[in-house]
Image (cartoon, helix red, strand yellow):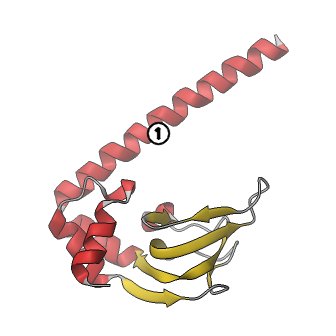
Amino acid sequence: MTLAQDIATLESVPFFRRLDHEALRLIAFAAESRRVQPGDVLFRRGEPSDGAYVVMSGGVTLEGDPAGPVEAGRATLLGELALLTDTERPLTAVASAPGHVLKITRPVFRRVLEEYPAAAEALREMIARRMDETVARLGQIGDSLDAIGG
């Protein structure tokens, strides 16, 4: 894939949608590009995470969820939390089709946030909004549990 194609795919990833073109260009340029074949393991459950992956083409199966495997396709970001903090991989990711992924390491992502403060602010706002939504949902769950037990 070309740099322009990588940037176009990154623009379609919801987590990156609010970043400007130059910030996405830096990510696309600095990320580790990798071709994958079916059965290639991107990461395993329990491993320390050092970044996230974007599925540029092909597919990746996420294994280890009690609800069953989940298929991730083009423009899916795997491990977004790993861009921001140290964490362990909650699932195993295995290529399910020939394709291409970009690995965005935490240092690369931090560089983007340092060099593009507007990107950092946009992501901060998105994360804050997600946290507010999560707190509201947890409140609803708490209310439902109170009604059941009360």
Whether residue 37 is situated above or below residue 12 in the rendered picture: below
Q: Furthest residue to the right?
A: 149
Whether residue 43 is situated above or below residue 11 in the rendered picture: below
Can residue 85 be seen in the rendering of this structure? no
Whether residue 8 is situated above or below residue 30 in the rendered picture: above
Q: What element carries label 1?
A: helix
> How dense is the environment of label 1, judged by Cα within 10 Å: few (below 14), some, or many (20 and up)?
few
Which residue lies under the disc numbered 1? Answer: 131
Number of labels in the image equals 1
Can residue 149 be seen in the rendering of this structure? yes
Tell me what residue is drawn at x 77 percent, y 53 percent: 67
Tell me what residue is drawn at x 48 percent, y 89 percent: 35
**Apparent side of residue 142 relative to residue 114 in the rendered image (left or right):** right
**Where's the C terminus, which quadrant?**
top right
Whether residue 118 is situated above or below residue 86 in the rendered picture: above
Q: Which amino acid does label 1 sit on?
A: Met
x then y, percent, for residue 126: 35, 45
**Apparent side of residue 129 relative to residue 3 in the rendered image (left or right):** right
- Residue 32 or residue 115, whichever sits in front: 32
x then y, percent, for residue 75: 42, 65
**Where's the N terminus, which quadrant?**
bottom left
Determine the image quadrant of residue 69.
bottom right
Tell me what residue is drawn at x 84 percent, y 15 percent: 149
Tell me what residue is drawn at x 48 percent, y 33 percent: 133
x then y, percent, for residue 128: 38, 41
**Apparent side of residue 124 relative to residue 106 in the rendered image (left or right):** left
Determine the image quadrant of residue 12.
bottom left
x then y, percent, for residue 83: 43, 67
